[in-house]
Amino acid sequence: MEDKKLTMPMIALRGLTVLPQMTVNFDIIRDKSIAAVEQAMVGDQRVFLATQKQPDEVIPDIDGIFQVGTIGYVKQLVKMPGGMVRVTVEGQERAELLEMEKGEACCTAIVEILDPVEDDLDTIQKEAMLRILKEKLEEYGKLNVAAGREVLSPLIAQPDLTELMNQISAQFPWNYEARQSVLECRTLTEMYETELQLLLTELEVYRVKREFQTKVKAALDKNQRDYILREQLRVIREELGEENPVSDADEMKEQLKKIKASVEVKERIRKEINRFQNMPAGSQDANVIRTYLETVLELPWNKMTKDNASLKHAEEILEADHYGLEKVKERVLEYLAVRILTKKGTSPILCLVGPPGTGKTSIARSIAKAMGRKYVRISLGGVRDEAEIRGHRKTYVGAMPGRIVEGLKQAGVANPLMLLDEIDKVSSDYKGDTSSALLEVLDSEQNVKFRDHYVEIPIDLSEVLFIATANTTQTIPGPLLDRMELIEVNSYTENEKYHIAKDYLIPKQLEKNGLSKEQLNITGPALEKMIHSYTREAGVRNLERRVGDICRKAAREVLEKKKPSIRVTERNLDHYLGREKVFFDAAGNEAQVGIVRGLAWTSVGGDTLQIEVNVMPGKGVLQMTGQMGDVMKESAQIALTYVRSVASDYGVKENYFEKHDIHLHIPEGAVPKDGPSAGITMATAMLSAVTGRKVLPRVAMTGEVTLRGHVLMIGGLKEKLLAARMAQVEKVLVPAKNQPDVKELSKEITKGMEIVYIKEMNEVIREAFVPEK
Ligand code: ADP
């Protein structure tokens, strides 16, 4: 026995079992396996091949390897690119793995050569088994014709049972587990039983497979038969002179004749109709195509309205629909003039940017009216999935075209004015990039052939006039922003709101609620109070709602109490609208330490924000709380550095900051604030807190500070000044570089407020601190 034990390099195989007399090629990549082959090559070229129970990356311990393997003779070894080695091995003898050692370089196995498979059968038994196996092979050949001749004929010609079984196990396309079970057989009987079992399983699989195929074919045949019968029925009806009921497909063909579209488009639709016609009615596929065809036939394709090219007409309509908005109207008219002259819509896309309720949608609607175009609005707020823009492929269950195509269908013409509302609110996530789909829609080079996944046929969007609206440009992706021409629509002043309400909103709501001017009169002071005490907004949307509330209540009173006319005054306003809803956080009268009022711009309008700073004994830590973004936190750091650098000028002791912590807080408002415009406010509050000097109560400020105390320019001035006004601020500190912006604003905004222009931080301190006596 002793001489049967051998020590040799070993390869743990993954998903492969090698049998004696089998020559195989395989690639190895793991370092240990490569080293094993290399070691074999310097010795007698023999290597032990055993199969891993799990085909994992790591080489398992002996328990994770099948015990019986094969000693192989390495015939060839070729280095491949990527560190791989291709080996050709011939299986020689079966052997049992006794011990295995995972060495530094390679694995070594101690194996014992197993006796050849024991012959435990007599001649008659062997002959019987031989015949049975051959019968099964023939059956297999009939079911799997592809495997046929080449493999099977030499097997069937084999006269010796042992040889036949060896060949079957080596040549049949079995997986490694099947081969392993053959490898482990110790007697001929065992081997015969294992192989027969495997063959029978294989036969069964083929039989079931064939059954399935036959069933599918029968179903297809039936569809075809139905179709032929239906056709025959049609012919018979014709022969009898009876009228055939008009089929859906015929109706669609009629419709197709009427639509205006290019030859190619019509041809493609016609093909689909033919396909539909040849499908069994009521089948799932037919329903999918029917819905598709209905959609496609409803699209406007080349149907268009004629533009009204009169600029004067446009001007009249814009004037009649909107109060004020001079700059916006001017820009819109310039834009229209260019369009009229160039005839083609290659001009950039307009984007109206401003807080909610300032009339952006309504301007777009007026532009459509002025040009005589159909108007459709596509709301993009919250669109996250590219498929919402571009549609789903029609193979999806319940697939639909995207919103752009839906918009066209709704408009019924190929050249509507399409409003892309809230373009700043689209977001991109894992389902594909919404903004790049939009980019394709808006790009005049690409949108001639816009592809909707559902419609499939390219659609020409070049005649559509796109206008977008947004609350802020900050969240619009750069490439989209690049394609658009921005027009800013600002917040309204109280005076503007008053006029809008009086001349537009009230008449509109009266008409909507079926009231006449005589029946309901809202007095001037009442309107002012509504604006001031019942609404707080940049636009006029809530104001319009409140007017609507009054109208509804009044309508009821007119009917129920038979009142001929109703007068809403300052005094009876609460009867209609309830108690005052809005209280302004007006500036107090008392000067305080460490509290300063700043001005902020948000996408929904201006706001004031109180910045609070407190100091306490500590180690020089700056703590920040409240609704602050990253930019603002950075500003706070800069402000602190500035304050430390000048503190000694204001009498603060040298080691003050090592011994104190500073806490900065922005208490109000749920809207997160960010952006660089509160620097000077924070610096002032900090300096006030560390020096203990008071800050004047009715002062507000806006501006960014640099490390050296220079004051930088800011944006959103109109909104900020309006907010300051609301808060009854008397003095506003504004960066000197913003002076031209202030000059552009109407007097109404700045009336009664002192605007002080500042260049340096020390001027801010001088203006904001209560003067020392
Ligand atoms: P946005 O699209 O900016 O959110 P809307 O266009 O929906 O605002 O405007 C809200 C309401 O206010 C509409 O009924 C609109 O007609 C009215 N409105 C806004 N601005 C004006 C204005 N300058 N003149 C007349 N009506 C206005």
Image: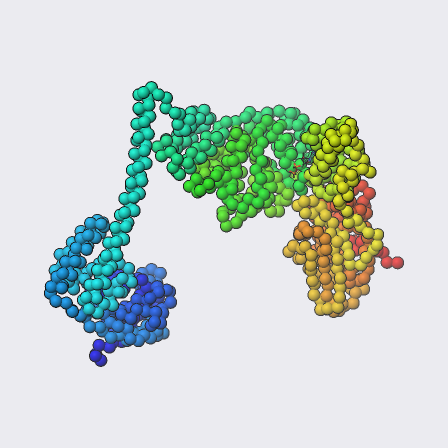
In the rendered image, residue 736, in percent from the top left (x then y), is placed at 75, 48
Q: Quadrant of the C terminus?
A: bottom right
* Extreme residue toward the front, this view: 560
Residue 217 location in percent, x, y? 29, 41
Q: Residue at x 60, y 30 (%)?
A: 368
Ligand 1 image-quadrant field: top right
Q: Tell me which residue sits at (81%, 64%) in the image.
A: 651
Q: Is residue 385 left or right of residue 710?
A: left
Q: Is residue 90 above or below residue 482?
A: below
* Residue 91 visible in the picture: no
Work out whether residue 302 can be spotted.
yes
- The quadrant in which residue 658 appears is bottom right
Instruction: Give 693 or 381, whichever is nearer the viewer.
Output: 381
Residue extending furthest right? 773
Q: In the image, residue 263 lies at what x, y percent?
A: 41, 28
Picture quarter with the N terminus: bottom left
* Quarter of the rendering containing residue 69: bottom left
Counting every numbered tag in the picture gives: 0
